[in-house]
Image: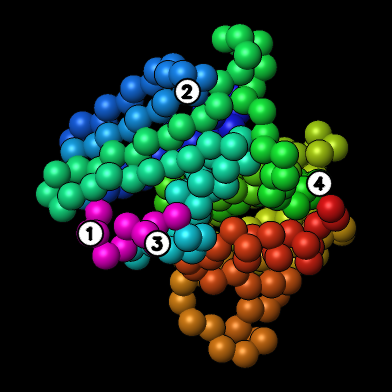
């Protein structure tokens, strides 16, 4: 399913980010006593014991540019399907994630059943364009926003974002909201895009995304809102609640 692919992608991405100098990732899946067991192991530096209990908290991250969303999304999906996720890690010896999910009655017949009282994410409708020069952030935002029900496209910089905006508009599928990173290499970031869309009617909602401290309402003009990095799944949900229909 798409959710299963989402879990693997986020865990692999987390492992890759932990090994900037390279390393190995091992993925194993097996069926045991009515459960599917998925194990993903890396040869990275490991996770300090004192923070292992916090890594699944939305917004918790040890990366300067991280969003803190990847593992939180994984945990949400696992629990939605009645499963469990565990982490085993020792500093200097890598990290292993072990996921247990209830299997379908027959292989390929249906997805694992959701728990009787699942915590469903609030669902929204609309189209969002995410612009950020960092690929991990683009991927995680696309997964998190998609999990909340919206259709997402991504762009690496201002010119690419503007091109995708114009293309979507010409196809009759305009974006309802643009989430734009303040600074990108080359200088064509959020303000560059906003300047070129300021006179458009109807104009999409423009949200400024940044890790910098901005003071006063004038600092975020002409944007409709500000999302500070690192942001959590709850903050993304609140952003959509304010600017999109559910």
Q: Nearer the viewer, mark 2 or mark 1?
A: 2
Return the x and y of residue 238 as percentages of the image width and height. 71, 65
Please report the residue visible at 53 percent of the width from the left and 83 percent of the height from the top. Answer: 214
The crowd level at tag 4 (other Cα within 10 Å; few <14, some 14-19, many 20+) is some
The Cα–Cα distance between marks 4 and 3, rounded to whole angstroms, is 31 Å
The Cα–Cα distance between marks 3 and 2, rounded to whole angstroms, is 25 Å
Return the x and y of residue 206 as percentages of the image width and height. 70, 64
- Residues drawn in magenta: 47-56
Q: Nearer the viewer, mark 4 or mark 2?
A: 2
Q: Decide whether residue 178 is among the magenta residues.
A: no
Any mark on residue 124, and which?
A: none
The mark nearer the N terminus, 1 or 4, is 1
The mark nearer the N terminus, 2 or 1, is 2
Local secondary structure at mark 1? loop
The mark nearer the N terminus, 4 or 2, is 2
The Cα–Cα distance between marks 1 and 3, rounded to whole angstroms, is 11 Å
Local secondary structure at mark 2? strand
The residue labelled by disc 1 is 48
Position of the N terminus by quadrant: top right
Any mark on residue 36, and which?
A: 2
Any mark on residue 54, and which?
A: 3
Please report the residue visible at 39 percent of the width from the left and 21 percent of the height from the top. Answer: 29
Asked whether, in this view, residue 44 is left or right of residue 208, the answer is left
The residue labelled by disc 4 is 125
Question: Can residue 151 be seen from the camera position used here?
Answer: no
Q: Residue furthest left?
A: 92
Kindly check if marks 1 and 4 are in contact, taking CB atoms under 8 A apart as contact: no
The Cα–Cα distance between marks 2 and 1, rounded to whole angstroms, is 28 Å
Return the x and y of residue 33 as percentages of the image width and height. 46, 19
């Amino acid at each position: 399913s798409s959710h299963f692919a989402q879990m693997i992608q986020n865990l692999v991405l987390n492992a890759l980010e932990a090994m900037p100098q390279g390393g190995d990732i091992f993925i194993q899946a097996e069926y045991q006593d009515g459960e599917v067991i998925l194990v993903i192991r890396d040869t990275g530096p490991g996770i300090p014991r004192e923070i292992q209990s916090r890594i699944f908290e939305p917004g918790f991250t040890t990366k300067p540019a991280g969003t803190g969303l990847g593992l939180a999304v994984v945990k949400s999906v696992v629990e939605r399907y009645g499963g469990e996720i565990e982490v085993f890690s020792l500093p200097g010896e890598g990290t292993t994630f072990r996921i247990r999910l209830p299997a379908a009655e027959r292989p390929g017949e249906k997805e694992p059943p959701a728990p009787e009282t699942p915590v469903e994410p609030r669902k929204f409708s609309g189209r969002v364009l995410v612009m950020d020069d960092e690929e991990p952030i683009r991927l995680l935002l696309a997964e998190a926003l998609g999990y909340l029900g919206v259709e997402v496209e991504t762009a690496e910089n201002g010119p690419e974002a503007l091109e995708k905006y114009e293309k979507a508009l010409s196809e009759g599928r305009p974006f309802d909201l643009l989430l734009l990173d303040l600074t990108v290499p080359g200088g064509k970031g959020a303000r560059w895009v906003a300047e070129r869309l300021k006179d458009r009617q109807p104009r999409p909602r423009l949200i400024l995304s940044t890790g910098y401290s901005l003071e006063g309402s004038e600092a975020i003009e002409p944007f409709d809102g500000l999302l500070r990095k690192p942001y959590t799944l709850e903050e993304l949900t609140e952003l959509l609640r304010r600017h999109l229909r559910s």
